[in-house]
Structures are given as structure tokens and as C-alpha cells.
């Protein structure tokens, strides 16, 4: 390799949000923090896991439950009116 043109390729530690740590090689030069790794990803664990970073799942649930309740209310009103 030609000297002084390549970044340093060193061993770094990857730290996952699940607490798992492992070593890899990178030119990053510092620790790498990740949200999901091969130890906790649903593909490898076989378990369902919702990665809800921005509260989107909660928002969807709230909206859905409100819509369902509103529909029931409309039905009740129609039944009462008839
Ligand atoms: Zn993990």
C-alpha cells in the first residue's frame, strides 16, 4: 500500500442499545453506537419487536382506537334513530 494516503484501519468496539458489544474493524477511529445488532434484531431472535423511535406506533394506535370508537358511536346513533 502507498504510505500516507490510506486511513487507519483499526479495531473498534460496537455498542448496541441492547447492551451487546462486539469488536470490528473500521477507519472510524472511535466506538460505534448502534440501535440494533445481530443479538437483538428480530430476524435473529425470531421474536416480534417494534422499534418505535419517534412514537409513531403509539400515534397510530391512538388514531385507530379513536376511529373505531367513533364508528361504534355512529352505529349506535343510527340504531337509536331508527
Ligand atoms: Zn443489540
Image: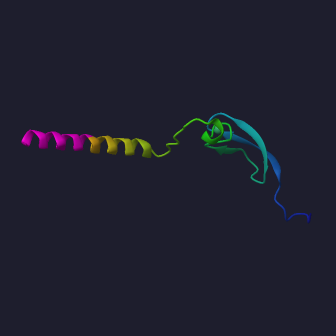
Q: Quadrant of ligand 1?
A: top right
User: Does the stretch in magenta take in 76?
Assistant: yes
Residue at the farthest top position? 19
Residue at the farthest left position? 81
Q: Which residues are magenta?
A: 69-82
Q: Residue at the spot x=33%, y=45% of the render?
A: 63
Main SS, magenta residues: helix
The reply, left or right, for residue 36 in relation to residue 69 is right
Residue 76 in which image quadrant: top left
User: Does the stretch in magenta take in 43?
Assistant: no
Q: Residue at the spot x=49%, y=43% of the render?
A: 52
Q: Residue at the spot x=73%, y=47% of the render?
A: 30
| Image quarter of the N terminus | bottom right
Q: Position of residue 73 (x, y in %)?
A: 19, 40
* Along the viewing direction, whichever of 55 and 70 lies nearer the viewer: 70
Q: Position of residue 18 (x, y in %)?
A: 62, 35
Residue 17 in which image quadrant: top right
The reply, left or right, for residue 22 in relation to residue 41 is right
| Image quarter of the C terminus | top left
The reply, left or right, for residue 66 in relation to residue 17 is left
Q: Residue at the spot x=66%, y=44% of the render?
A: 33
Q: Position of residue 56 (x, y in %)?
A: 43, 46
* Along the viewing direction, whichever of 14 and 44 lies nearer the viewer: 44
The reply, left or right, for residue 50 in relation to residue 3 is left
Residue at the farthest front position? 82
Q: How many marks?
A: 0
Amino acid at each position: 500500500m502507498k504510505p500516507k494516503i490510506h486511513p487507519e484501519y483499526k479495531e473498534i468496539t460496537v455498542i448496541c442499545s441492547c447492551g451487546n458489544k462486539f469488536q470490528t474493524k473500521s477507519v472510524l477511529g472511535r466506538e460505534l453506537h448502534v440501535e440494533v445488532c445481530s443479538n437483538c434484531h428480530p430476524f435473529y431472535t425470531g421474536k416480534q419487536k417494534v422499534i418505535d423511535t419517534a412514537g409513531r406506533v403509539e400515534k397510530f394506535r391512538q388514531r385507530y382506537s379513536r376511529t373505531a370508537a367513533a364508528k361504534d358511536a355512529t352505529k349506535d346513533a343510527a340504531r337509536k334513530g331508527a
